[in-house]
Image (cartoon, grey):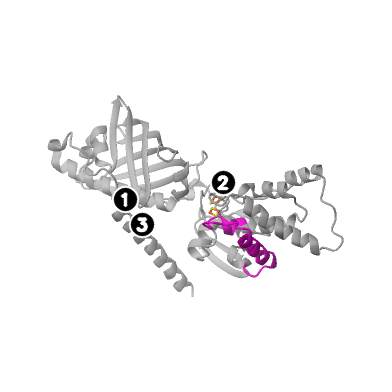
Amino acid sequence: MTDVTLTVNGTIRRASVEPRTSLADYLRDDLRLTGTHLGCEQGVCGACTIVVGGRPVRSCLAFAAACDGADVRTIEGLDSDATMVELRAAFTAEHALQCGFCTPAMLITARDIVQRLPHADDRRVRLELGGNLCRCTGYVGIVRAIRKVLDAHAATRPGAPELPQAAEMARDVRHNTPLPVVSPMPSASSSPPSAKESQPGGGVEIRESFEIHRPREHVWSLFADLRRVTSCVPGAELLEQAGESFKGRIKVKLGPIVANFIGDADLHLDPSSHSGDVSGRGADSGNGSRAQGKMAFTLSSIDATSTKVDATITYSLTGSLAQFGRPGIVRAVVQRLMQDFARAVEDDLAGGAANEGRKPARTELNAISLAVSIFRSEIRSLFSRFTRLFRRK
Ligand code: FES
Ligand code: FES
């Protein structure tokens, strides 16, 4: 844990955070400042934009620990800011929002434009908004709203100067960094089990361990048989196999979100160390999402009758599902998958040969029980936050 002191919306906040905690997660989860939204969590959509040290920053890419001593302003802290009051009225008048998901961050960027570029024309406004995505309103109303505030400011400015020439604007664009990123990476060795950490390739890593109440040799015999392994994974189906390469499908359903990936994978086993890995890539043609990843596992004997499985999953997700792929949710899905997998392995081993060639017990993850388990873990983390807060007082 790292101790940090931040000034958030004018109040000094001291906290002890994991080195990998993003500023967005700290603000949302610890301070309950949920006006900062999370979309892609990869620095693409701009939904998490806040103000750090007077400049707009994507808080999903900034680590809270790296912002020690910073002055942070979220949308909640700009409630009575004069420019924000004007912008909010203009957004309402110009129909510059629909679902409102992008709006807090859009307003923060708009405020930055109004304050930093009082002479911006529409082209420049659009350019500056390039880091904020809106999936429903479109940008016409948003640009109109910002234009309205810029024009109102220009009209009240005594002896307002001419708009700058195009060349001057181009120089401004090159020299200004609309969304600076504060993101020194923590070292991988600092991550405890079940950690999320950005990988060099941009993926996320999740580590999980679970126990199977069977001797290691029995568990290994099952892990070496792809058809039996697949039959134990909820929602998974083996479509084709050629040696160590195979084609498969996996379906995960969580409320309205359905992931149905078909892809290829390769399995490598090392019997001498009772370890192996599966790497694969797949696509969900229904929503255009793509995923690739690797799961490395090692079996170790706890005693003569029990085996510990350590698994490290590294994955990256692109496309529309990426916006639901918050590491917390993915981790909950993975934990649930592993619990179900461990139970199914024990069932299989208890049934022995009689189970060979059986159909998978389930065709997909149980959405309701998964949602309940995620809800439970959210409650647990809320409870531990309250406990921490209580202890600090
Ligand atoms: Fe931070 Fe998308 S850029 S959530
Ligand atoms: Fe819905 Fe922008 S108003 S995403």
Q: Quadrant of ligand 2?
A: bottom right
- Toward the right, the furthest residue is 159
Characterize the local packing of mark 1: few (<14), some (14-19) or many (20 or more) Cα atoms within 10 angstroms. many
Residue drawn at x 36%, y 31% as measured from the top left: 265
Between disc 2 and disc 1, whose residue precedes? 2
Residue type at numbered disc 1: Arg
Question: Mark number for residue 44?
Answer: 2
Q: Could you say where residue 339 lies in the image, as x and y percent from the top left?
A: 28, 49
Q: Does 78 lie within the magenta span?
A: no
Q: Name the kind of residue labelled 3 in the image.
A: Ile
Disc 2 Cβ-to-ligand 1 distance below 8 Å: yes
Say which quarter of the image contains residue 237.
top left
The residue carrying pointer 3 sits among few (fewer than 14), some (14 to 19) or many (20 or more) residues within 10 Å by Cα, namely many
Q: Write down the residue under mark 3.
A: 374
Please indicate, yes or no, whether residue 65 appears anywhere in the rendered image.
no
Q: CA distance from mark 2 to mark 1?
A: 29 Å
Is residue 353 rendered to the left or right of residue 187? left
| Residue type for callout 2 | Val
Q: Nearer the viewer, mark 2 or mark 1?
A: 2
Compare residues 305 and 224 and report the one nearer the observer.
224
Measuring from the top left, give residue 389's x and y in whole percent.
Answer: 47, 71
Examine the rendering and report whether any part of residue 159 can be seen: yes
Q: Residue at x 31, y 47 (%)?
A: 337
Secondary structure type for disc 2: loop
Q: Earlier in the sequence, mark 1 or mark 3?
A: 1
Range of the magenta residues? 79-106
What is the crowding at mark 2: few (fewer than 14 residues within 10 Å), some, or many (at least 20)? some
Which disc number belongs to residue 264?
none
N-terminal of the two: label 3 or label 2?
2
Q: Residue at x 18, y 41 (%)?
A: 348
Circle 1 residue: 336
Secondary structure type for disc 1: helix
